[in-house]
Amino acid sequence: MLQKQLYCNLDQSIYTVSLDNPAEKKRNDIWWIDPDGSNIEEVINNIKQSFLSDGLVWFLKNTDLKTAFKEIESEHDSFNKFYKARYFAEHLKR
């Protein structure tokens, strides 16, 4: 799978408690920043840690064109697979 997202490890329930949708309350792929920016340093540090622990491995693996192509090729035939293959091919034309 080529898509990979980073995950927030901070307790941000004070921001999600007012959301109506239970699924939205459980999301951990969004970082909430106070309007006054008071938690910005904590958020940036958490994003950095998430990238270093998860994102960097994904990035290094998928910036290798052969590996990226094998990932796309190994997926089940679907719209998503062909969509990725199309943009992969366009990238190779450049």
Image (cartoon, rainbow, N blue to C red):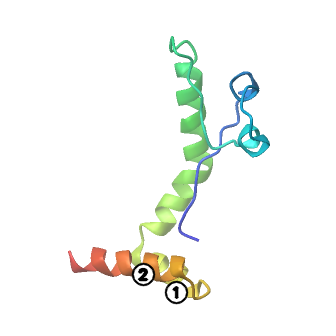
Q: Residue at x 59, y 28 (%)?
A: 32
Q: Kindly identify the amino acid type of the residue bearing the numbered disc 1.
A: Glu
What is the quadrant of residue 18 in the picture? top right
The alpha-carbon separation of the residues under discs 1 and 2 comes to 8 Å
Residue bearing mark 2: 85
Q: Residue at x 42, y 81 (%)?
A: 85
Q: Categorize mark 2 by other alpha carbons within 10 Å: few (<14), some (14-19), many (20+).
A: some
Q: Are marks 1 and 2 in contact (CB under 8 Å)?
A: yes
Residue bearing mark 1: 73
Badge 1 element? helix
| Residue 71 x, y percent position in the rendering | 54, 79
Which of 23 and 82 lies nearest the eye of the viewer? 23
Q: Is residue 68 above or below residue 38?
A: below
| Residue 87 x, y percent position in the rendering | 36, 75
What is the quadrant of residue 89 in the picture? bottom left
**80 left or right of 93 in image:** right
| Residue 83 x, y percent position in the rendering | 44, 77
**26 left or right of 71 in image:** right
Badge 2 element? helix
